[in-house]
């Protein structure tokens, strides 16, 4: 697999590798693993939220506005 980075991104990656004394490939693998885990989590949350909405488990706009106003007062 090839990865193409902008000059700026590659420079920042090189700096990070130097500062942390870690290999660039290790940093890239860690970043990719974090991206994958985040997207898996997000997809799961969206599916669960859509299922809840389909079941009618929703909050009205008025309730959300009231909740936000109460939080402003804190």
Image (tube, rainbow, N blue to C red):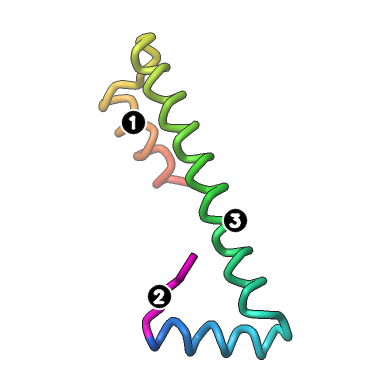
Cα distance in 3D space between marks 2 and 1: 44 Å
Quarter-of-image position of residue 46: top left
Which residue reaches farthest top? 55
Q: Is residue 46 magenta?
A: no
Rendered position, 51 above or below 9:
above
The residue located at (68%, 80%) in the rendering is: 23
Which residue reaches farthest front? 1
The residue located at (38%, 9%) in the rendering is: 55
Rendered position, 47 above or below 56:
below
Q: Position of residue 51 (x, y in %)?
A: 41, 17
Q: Which residue is mark 2?
A: 4
Q: Which residue is mark 1?
A: 64
Q: Are marks 2 and 1 in contact (CB under 8 Å)?
A: no
Of residues 49 and 11, the one nearer the viewer is: 11
Q: Position of residue 9 (x, y in %)?
A: 43, 81
Residue stretch rendered in magenta on the structure: 1-6
Q: Secondary structure at mark 1?
A: helix
The residue located at (59%, 56%) in the rendering is: 33
Q: Is residue 6 left or right of residue 18?
A: left
Which label number is shown at residue 34?
none
Q: Which is nearer the N-term, disc 2 or disc 1?
A: 2
Q: Which is nearer the N-term, disc 3 or disc 1?
A: 3
Q: Is residue 2 magenta?
A: yes
Q: Nearer the viewer, mark 2 or mark 1?
A: 2
Q: Which residue is mark 3?
A: 33
Q: Secondary structure at mark 2?
A: loop
Q: Nearer the viewer, mark 3 or mark 2?
A: 2
Of residues 72 and 43, the one nearer the viewer is: 43
Q: Nearer the viewer, mark 3 or mark 1?
A: 3
């Amino acid at each position: 697999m090839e990865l193409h980075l902008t000059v700026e991104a590659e420079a920042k990656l090189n700096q990070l590798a130097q500062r942390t004394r870690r290999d660039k490939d290790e940093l890239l693998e860690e970043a990719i693993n974090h991206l994958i885990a985040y997207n898996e989590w997000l997809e799961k949350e969206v599916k669960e939220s859509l299922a809840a909405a389909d079941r009618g488990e929703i909050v009205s706009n008025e309730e959300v506005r009231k909740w936000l106003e109460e939080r402003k007062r804190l």
